[in-house]
Image (tube, coloured by chain):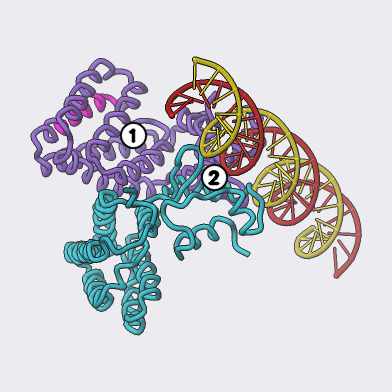
Chain colours: A purple, B cyan, C red, D yellow
Amino acid sequence: MKDAYSLIVSAIETGVFRPGDRLVESELAERFGVSRTPVREALQRLETQSMLKRDGRSLIIATLDHNQLAELYTVRAELEALAARLAARNASPEEIRVLGAMVAEDQAIVNDPQALARANRRFHHQVHLASHNRYLVQQLDLVHRSMALMARTTLAAKGRGAVALEEHQALVDAIASGDSALAEQSLRRHISNAFETRLKEEARQFGEQPATGIDNEL
Amino acid sequence: MKDAYSLIVSAIETGVFRPGDRLVESELAERFGVSRTPVREALQRLETQSMLKRDGRSLIIATLDHNQLAELYTVRAELEALAARLAARNASPEEIRVLGAMVAEDQAIVNDPQALARANRRFHHQVHLASHNRYLVQQLDLVHRSMALMARTTLAAKGRGAVALEEHQALVDAIASGDSALAEQSLRRHISNAFETRLKEEARQFGEQPATGIDNEL
DNA sequence: CTGATGCAGTTTGCTTGCAATCCGGCGGCG
DNA sequence: CGCCGCCGGATTGCAAGCAAACTGCATCAG
């Protein structure tokens, strides 16, 4: 049995709880078979990571409107760019080989968006680690946790998976060559494309979603 | 009476608890006149902000060694630079006037390092807000909280206060003129000087500190 | 004399129960 | 007819107590 924190996080990540939902301590406690205290602690931790936000006295799952999305991508681009630059300078040969291997392996699952999304998270995390800056790793963790609030992965978009892997490969090559400017440029382009894809997906689905309860209140 | 969280934070910030100290729930509970539950919650929140870290089963106040210091300043420089750039683009005239006023007022306390340190934090926070990016504000909050673990402020160094205010003024001017490149450059120089000052102070005091219990174990 | 083992004290993690607060509906009054 | 205030349920915040885990010490066996 895992702890309340991980249980709640994965419930959010798998979409059991959705942005805007209200989380009631006693409900969660019963659902997970623990008492309210560990649930409370988990909720407060999630609140400080701003996956939850207060609504009056109770907690709801944070929602991302268009502006927040843009702000989040801005911060993410900057931090990831820094990570790429540092990784190009600091990554050890072993780390570089691991990154290369990850890209190669991911070719096999290029048509499974769910698996690819997980692999994608692992890949980026590995890049973060290669920066050898633990604060950067921590901050990027936070950013990615907020990104988990976005329902769909952009990797489900037609053709995006293959392109994303090419971009990953380019990044690994840049890191391997120790060219920090190229690594940064490569990563910025990757993030930028991801954002663009997300905006397109968002636009494509405009109006066709049934009540999600979060952004169609009129 | 404030809540346990703020009480603990200010105890750390004022140096009542020092890096490396072990925090025992029951002690804190008694000291603050509350039960262990709110203390626990506060401690866990501080842990997720990495002001505390686990040492075995219990929590100690996080320490910053030289490497961590460098890593922290690296991340900070990047995020603050982004904030400066965005502030130059997005700050409203009112916000700019407030920033100018803050610098002007701070001239009066240039010789009171404690007050100046507080004013400095307020000033930077105001710059962050002027970026109009709430994720950036949040991330920079985190960075500054980790910086609170450093005992002394660099503003106590001889002459640093006055120079720092000049740098603040330069930043405000750049933001006011809407020149994002200049604002970024100006802020990077400011951070860089602060870091340099800190390293000098650190070097100056090498060997003269009695057992702090954290970095002189032999 | 050294190392292992068990015991006691300390501290954390969790449960349970209680008090305070907030939200919604309902009735009274203007 | 509408607005205000009150009451009941629901939910959070806090407190106290209990069980389990770890630490350090002492004792005993080899």
| Residues at marks 1 and 2, CA–CA distance in whole angstroms | 32 Å
Q: Is residue C17 left or right of residue A186?
A: right
The stretch drawn in magenta includes residue A1? no
According to the image, label 1 marks what residue?
A: A201
Q: Can residue B169 be seen in the rendering of this structure?
A: no
* Residue kind at label 2, given as amino acid type: Gln
Compared with B162, A18 (above or below) is above
Residue sitting at 66 percent across and 55 percent down? B34
According to the image, label 2 marks what residue?
A: A44
Q: Chain of mark 1?
A: A
Query: To which quarter of the image does residue B188 belong?
Result: bottom left
How many numbered markers are drawn? 2
* Residue kind at label 1, given as amino acid type: Glu
Residue B66, image x, y percentages: 26, 52
Task: Give the structural element (helix, strand or loop) at label 1.
Answer: helix
Residue B169, image x, y percentages: 25, 75
Q: Is residue A155 left or right of residue A65?
A: left
Query: To which quarter of the image does residue B88 belong?
Result: bottom left
Q: Is residue A171 left or right of residue A50?
A: left
- In the rendered structure, which segment of residues is drawn in magenta? A157-172
Q: Chain of mark 2?
A: A
Q: Residues within 10 Å of mark 1 (few under 14, many from 20)?
A: some
Magenta segment, prevailing SS (helix, strand or loop): helix
Residue sitting at 47 percent across and 37 percent down? B56
Whether marks 1 and 2 lie on the same chain = yes
Residue sitting at 63 percent across and 65 percent down? B1
Query: To which quarter of the image does residue A122 belong?
Result: top left
Nearer the camera: disc 1 or disc 2: 2
